Amino acid sequence: MSRPTYAERVARAGLSRVGEPDDSALRAVVATVGVVDAWEMVRASDDALPARLRARTGGRAAGADPGADLERLHALGGRLVCPGDDEWPASLDDLDAIGAAPLAMWVRGAGRLDALDRSVAVVGSRAFTAYGAHMADAIAGGLADRGWATVSGGAVGVDGAAHRAALVSGVSTVAVLACGVDVIYPPSHRDLLTSVAAAGLLVSEWPLGCSPMRHRFLIRNRLLAALSRGTVVVEAAVRSGALSTARWAQRLGRHTMAVPGPVTSAMSGGCNQLLRETDAVLVTDAAEVLELVGDLGADLAPRPQGAVAMRDALGDEARRVVEATPVRRYVTPDRIAQTAALPAVRVTSLLNQLCAQGLVEVSDEGFRLAAALRRAR
Amino acid sequence: MTLARAWSVGLVGLDGHLVEVQADLADGVPGFTLIGLPDTALHEARDRVRAAIANSGEKWPASRRITIGLSPATLRKSGSTYDLAVAVAILAAAGVVPVESTDGTVVLGELSLDGRVRPVRGVLPAVLTAVRSGVRRVLVPTMNAAEAALVPDVEVVGVPHLAAALRWLRGDPPRDDELVVDPIPVAPTEDAAGPDLRDVRGQAMGKRALEVAAAGGHHVLLLGPPGAGKTMLAERLPGLLPELDLTSALEVTAVHSVAGRLPAAASLVTRPPFQSPHHSTTVPALLGGGSGIPRPGAVSLAHRGVLFMDEAPEFRGGMLEGLRQPLESGEITISRSDGTARYPARFLLVLAANPCSCVRASGQPSSCTCSPQARRRYLAKLSGPLLDRVDIQVQLFAVGRGDLLDTAPVEDTAAVAARVAAARAAAGARLAGTPWRTNSEVPAGLLNDRWRIPPQLLRDVDGQLDRGRLSVRGRDRIQRLAWTVADLAGRSVPAREDVEEALALRSGAEAIAA
């Protein structure tokens, strides 16, 4: 596909102003005559258009000024990404196959839309529990630690927790909005959305100034699913919009995952239903997510390691401390330091770490080797 | 002349008010009344003053009706501090000393029946108040003269007895035993810095905890069996802290003066104080209080120093919680019937605890018979919001014979204190332009923003967070500690081993949670 001309850009901007993305009549016109002519027809209220489409778009077309829209977008530091642009992500073409491709993407932020090759959508309810908050944070944070971006909807609840975890880890995150990229919604996320724009991207298929409406969220969900390699539903009730994202992911052949919750918790009902009734895969942490969506072989979740193998993987100082730690009797860190000929404060730090790894045990009297290593000695 | 006045100072906490003592000698039925909200001790001043004047060889105006008015009349006045001022006012009204001789002079002191002037509490804050109110001369008991002379810009006259005070007011030359003290330049006292760290054998981590606490201003919990040397360690913490600057020294001295804790040859307290209340103490003794005007408690006496609470779980309920206000705001407010006093209370808290209640009896950790539940219950008395403010929580172990044989060179207090001073300077330079001086004060938000530790160094920390072994607050605390450890090592940014050591400095927290 060749790079779009300015006229085509204006046409796409104009068409996204006059019609909703799920307007099949408008979509049919675009498919027949192309975007530039379709825009001319809509603007001139051409008689060749179906009467109902004319009625729907006429009012909006009269007030539309896509050239000015684009100028305002540029003034905000944003850009319109159209099919054929370098930044147009190939993943969105999958929507073409099912006749649901967006006309253009209005984006704002430091990130790039085509850099979402390694990204996962983390979605869930707006009303979440502490469990949902923790899991969203753990999964998005874990993905970020391994260099994967998080795509989400910018809403309160799970979405917000996921964006925040990614931001804290210093990795790009993308908020796909159901309103213009200049509209702050929800208002309580003013700071969060500003940070997302600074470190990642705000994305929308609606022009500037469009307000979030109920049906737009459902249309938006297909972009969340399409832009990422897979979708994780963290916590969702049976009627949650997050399930619509999961359904889109399944329709697009993307990986669909869900974090299970207590069967007694209505807030996890949607996740559990997804696991029971669909092909969604149960995941409990970021490593398991990556095992599914990551590169074959490269992103396997780590197997639980045996204590002996862990000892062999220790650093030089830590190994000396293990050697100096007695099998049966508990001794003080100072004694272990003498035997290992290392500074006592350093030895205490290392013993503390070995304790966390389960390689040594601690009592009121001091440290000794843990059971697993006692047998190995 | 039948009306005269003298000046004194009334203290509510450390706040002083200039009090005017008026004496009126009128015709009428002879008598002696004292008005202006006096308490019992002050009512007794009538008898002390009458006896002291008679026994000093002066004539008591027995045929007159004597009224003493203390103003402002709404301020509650207590104690014996006003005795000397009352006597001077009466004798001025009676014409024994010139009326104008008392102008611009604050008179403090208790009289005994034979006319001697006895020392009183709170002379330092009283003289500070006098100077702030523009008074340039104070008449104080000889025993308090050195304390009063700590205040700059004031002429201090120490008087041993009433007759000397009268002679001075008349302008007669003083005799040998009467003292005029010039303001003495404040020189740091050469008092010993307390016990030396060299005396502690083994316990490398315990000593390190003190060093980090002193450098970063972190509160400490020492968790370990008897014989681990918790008390020995805590007593050596003040020695690691830097000398008090002049403002702090005056604050500390003033609090000790109000509490009546300054020695007779009072000099400025320039070393950080050390307070270790026993666990059987009362709430007023710990936090301040008492009847009438509240007096400072151990938390205020430990201001700019160390408050050591041994056997912390044994302190009665509510007492530990009472520490939260001073830990939060650096001062404590106590209200009693006669007024509300605010005392400074910015101290370094050292808590010590045994792992359970039974080892206290036996002294042998291995003979512990407590069930895990009993141990948890014992330490649970500490948990909650109090421990939330204690950055360092280390587990100590009983020192064995082998540790005593250790011949490795042991650092003395001076060497460690030098490192602490350097670390404090480094932290001060980094925090320049902020309201904070030590790492422990830096708010969590800035730790994740302005003074961020590279995320890859915090991987272990975050791993523990993910596994629920660490709280988010615990993570902040580890970052603060890592900065202090880095300051001590002379590094401008924490390295991996600093973070690892910070984790080890929190090992006691796990022992409590276990």
Image: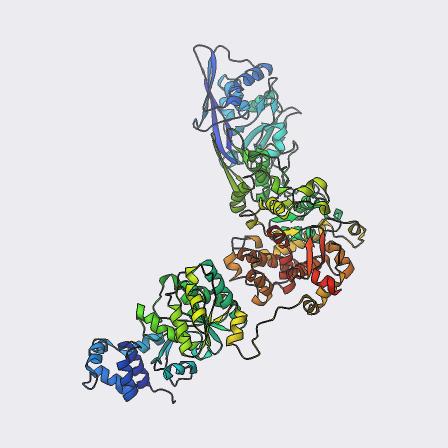
Q: Is residue A45 above or below residue A370?
A: below
Q: Which corner quadrant of the image does residue B286 belong to?
A: top right
Residue B389, position as x, y percentages in the image: 55, 49
Q: For the image shown, how many numbered marks are present on the structure?
A: 0
Q: Is residue A81 above or below residue A353?
A: below
Q: Is residue B245 visible?
A: no
Q: Position of residue A177 (x, y in %)?
A: 37, 71
Q: Is residue B340 above or below residue A19?
A: above
Q: Nearer the viewer, residue B402 or A120?
A: A120
Lateral position of residue B72 relative to residue B167, left or right: left
Q: Position of residue B159 (x, y in %)?
A: 61, 26
> Could you tell me which residue is drawn at 45 percent across and 26 percent down?
B71
| Residue B103 falls left or right of residue B461 | left
Residue A40 or residue A127, whichever sits in front: A127
Q: How is the image coloured?
A: rainbow
Position of A22 with respect to B265 (left or right) is left
Q: Quadrant of residue B455?
A: bottom right
What residue sits 22% from the left and 82% below the top? Answer: A43
- Whether residue A252 is visible here, answered yes or no, is yes
Give the x, y percent position of residue B244.
62, 45
Q: Hey, which quadrant is residue B297 in on the image?
A: top right
